Image (cartoon, rainbow, N blue to C red):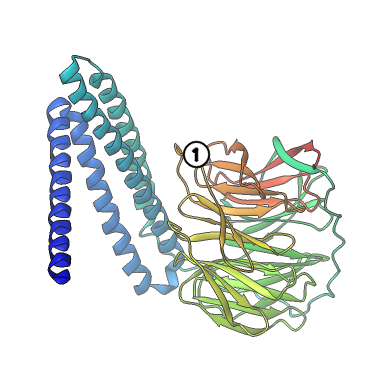
Amino acid sequence: MLQKLIISLLMIITVVGCQEAQMQKEGERAVKAFIAEMNPELAKKITQIETEITLSEQKIKKLSELRLKHPNHVTKIEFSLQKWTRLQYKLTNTLKEISEIVESAYVTYELDRIQGGKQFNKMSQQLLTSADTVLNTANATKTVIEQGIHELETPPPAPNAPHIISPIIPHKREAPPTVSLLPQKLYKELKGHTGDINSIAFSADGQMIVSGSNDNTVKFWDLKTFQIIKTLRASDDILTVALYGNILATAGNDHHITLWDLTTYTQTQTLKGHHGVIHSLAFSSDGHTLISGSWDKTIRIWDITSATEIRHIQTKDSIYTVALHPSGDIIVAGSFDETITLWETKTGKLLRTLQGNGMLTVYSVAFSPNGKQIISGDLSNTVRIWDADTGKSLWILNGDKDVFGGVFSVAYSPNGEFIASGSGDETVRLWHAETGKKLFTHPGSESEVRVVVFSPNGHILASGHDDNTIKLWHHTLKMDH
């Protein structure tokens, strides 16, 4: 008897579920028929967006296959692949938003038909304008992307280098501030590079900035005069720089790490072992160990004194970003497979994998100054705060709903109270680390923000952009409570 009752209930649930699905489909058809009749031009625009989404999916598939077939040219292919992925994400979100408003317009129309109102025409025109805007942006973006898809060039050979490393000069960092320092006012723009700014590092005393760019150069800037002190030339794009004392490490598309002696501004050593683009470097707190993350699906640990590889960690997918715990005992890495992984430095053992709902390719990760939290930025335009010990997601910080762009870079202020993020939506944002509250947003002058870094004392926030500039944001004071 009970078994029959259960079967009957399951049949009723199935029938009801089928009826609900059928009703939903009928509702979707009614909305499409309604918009086609009331505003054929808007219906056409919606169809165009759907077509663009399908085309972008095809492009992403082809580029993914191309990346596998031509591993020596993964850099150019990967950048195109990321742009197409972001375009698809933008179009999908836009279509979803328009569809929701169209459905609302349909309901409004039905109410108007019953009650005699006239609201739909105005709403329809607003939707048409929105559709036009996103399609124009999509077409412009597609043109730029397609121009670079087939530009596969072999990078020039790396220059010969001497093989002597000067003794490491210890850091003399300024003490963390005792007040909250909010970089709020743009007070200087540094110009000199001819390519995207991918990476920035401050000297320990905060008097100098080092920048790495797609123009194959590293530049050193005096923050008193805002002039270029020195320019170093590399064999390919500089995607990441790391600075400790008088030792500078640079890496990028040429698959190796270059060490420079800043007492003489000369190349001292080349660290070889990676077989793919190196997108992230991090020094240990004593400057004797360097961590590198690569698109060859490895994290490598290097001894700087002997310029040798200590060990390498094999990962499931390409690594975009790495950071070291203040103790040096744990490595955190962000990957193309939409995960964050924590590894034991001494053994290379995987400690934990962090996964977030809706999280996409992880572009940037950082430990808080006390090592208790991790922040991450990813392609979904989201900043996330994690508990470093448990892996629990504490906060999910989203950008404004009317903007789009992956979060390329995140950074903690020296006192750990604030978080900065730089995004593809051309903005620099400041957040309160404890509450997750967004404090303010800086426009990026119509240029993607590739990197954000606080000065050692927190007085300055530097941001690097794809318009070849570095922007310096000054602070206002807000007393801690």
Please state if 321 lies on the left or on the right of 432 as rendered.
left
Q: Residue 77: x, y in percent?
A: 40, 63
Task: Please identify the quarter of the rendering in which residue 182 is found.
Answer: top right
In this view, 216 is above or below 158: above
Please state if 222 lies on the left or on the right of 437 as rendered.
right
Position of the C terminus by quadrant: top right
Extreme residue in the front direction: 1
How many marks the image carries: the answer is 1
Residue in the image at 56% along x and 44% along y: 467
Judging depth in this view, the residue of 60 and 384 nearest the camera is: 384
Q: Residue 153: x, y in percent?
A: 44, 65
Q: Amino acid at mark 1?
A: Asp
Which residue is tagged 1?
A: 400
Q: Residue 254: x, y in percent?
A: 55, 70
Res 158 seen here: no
Residue in the image at 77% along x and 42% along y: 181
Judging depth in this view, the residue of 196 and 358 nearest the camera is: 358
Residue in the image at 56% along x and 74% along y: 352
Judging depth in this view, the residue of 210 and 54 nearest the camera is: 54
In this view, 299 is above or below 39: below
Please state if 25 lies on the left or on the right of 320 as rendered.
left
Q: Local crowd at mark 1 within 10 Å, few (<14), some, or many (≥20)?
A: few
Q: Residue 169: x, y in percent?
A: 86, 69
Please state if 45 lies on the left or on the right of 389 as rendered.
left
Judging depth in this view, the residue of 401 and 309 nearest the camera is: 401
Res 332 seen here: yes
In this view, 401 is above or below 366: above
Task: Please identify the quarter of the rendering in which residue 173 is found.
Answer: bottom right
Position of the N terminus by quadrant: bottom left
The secondary structure type at the circle numbered 1 is loop
